[in-house]
Image (cartoon, rainbow, N blue to C red):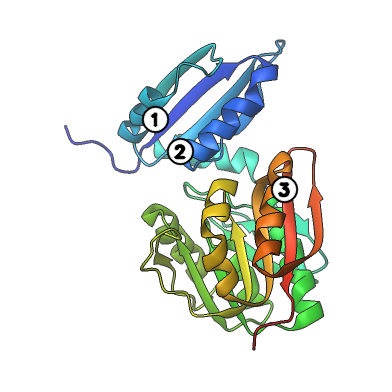
Amino acid sequence: MSQDTNNRGRLSITCEPQHSEAISHWIEQALNQTPVETQRPNTPIIQLDIYFETRLHADIALHALPDHLHLLHAETTELPAEAWTTFWQHHFRIENIGRQLRIVPHWETAPDHERHNLLINPGLSFGTGGHFTTRFCLEQLESTLEQQQPQSLIDAGTGSGILAITAHKLGIQTIDAFDNDPVATQQAQANAQLNQAPIQFRTADLLDPDLTLPPADLLCANILTGILLQAAPTLYRATRQRLILSGIREIEADAVAETFIQLGAREIMRDGNGEWCGIILDRDPPCT
């Protein structure tokens, strides 16, 4: 019997609370995935769930878990498409962000007043606005458009496409949005269609030496610190005015900021929630 291609794979890890951050950090660095963290009822045990396109992908990730992680248990399961939909309907709700934005799950009825509605089907991507890093980028994107009126955007590591779609709704017409995961770019393209946003997403690796990035006024990169550090010269060269960087652990923020400052950037502000951080940098002077 052929496998149902709509089914997903899930890797579930349990651990003690003091080890959850280190495990999550390894998952994000090694697997380029953001785990969903829950606490089991009536117990301090933490569960981390990571979702994949197929059960096979989840199995591969299971076997890649290193011995030094303090795991209580790890297993994979196949998740029917119906269960995946139910998961998101439980965890993803309408939410206002900033002064003008409203994130709306595609299965909800979008309110028709006061704010820009961003219709999102998360698929396998976790760019829904609920995570600090995505919220930071959305708020700073809105603020930058008020301060500098950028005409073009690069969205590096687009995920669900939420930043690029937001930029279009706020008036930016020239948008280059890409991700190294073809599943993410497919989902981002579907989200753009939901929002009637004429954006063409592409699959590209930021660390590819042959990558072409025509310079843009504004660059957003919500990706992991290791990639930000390696790609810093590429990102800086592609920025005319401002960089919005996130996906950064707070303990790594100084290293990221210093790397871009050495290239010629000027730090404008940073914000964090005790675990994650975002940084705003401007070119000084702006590149024309």
Q: Position of residue 18 (x, y in %)?
A: 70, 18
Secondary structure type for disc 2: helix
Residue 237, by quadrant, is bottom right
Query: Which label belongs to residue 31?
Result: 2
Residue ID for mark 1: 61
Q: CA distance from mark 3 to mark 1?
A: 28 Å
Q: Position of residue 232 (x, y in %)?
A: 57, 61
State yes or no: discs 1 and 2 in contact (Cβ < 8 Å).
yes
Seen in the picture, residue 35 relative to 93 is either above or below; the reply is above
- Which amino acid type corresponds to the residue marked 2 in the rendered image? Leu
Q: CA distance from mark 3 to mark 2?
A: 21 Å
Seen in the picture, residue 127 relative to 177 is either above or below; the reply is above
Task: Give the residue displayed 62% in from the left and 52% down from the top.
Answer: 128
Secondary structure type for disc 3: helix
Q: CA distance from mark 1 to mark 2?
A: 7 Å
Q: Position of residue 193 (x, y in %)?
A: 48, 70
- First in residue order: circle 3 vs circle 2: 2
Name the front one of labels 3 and 2: 3
Residue ID for mark 3: 253
Name the front one of labels 3 and 1: 3
In depth, the one of 153 and 214 nearer the eye is: 214
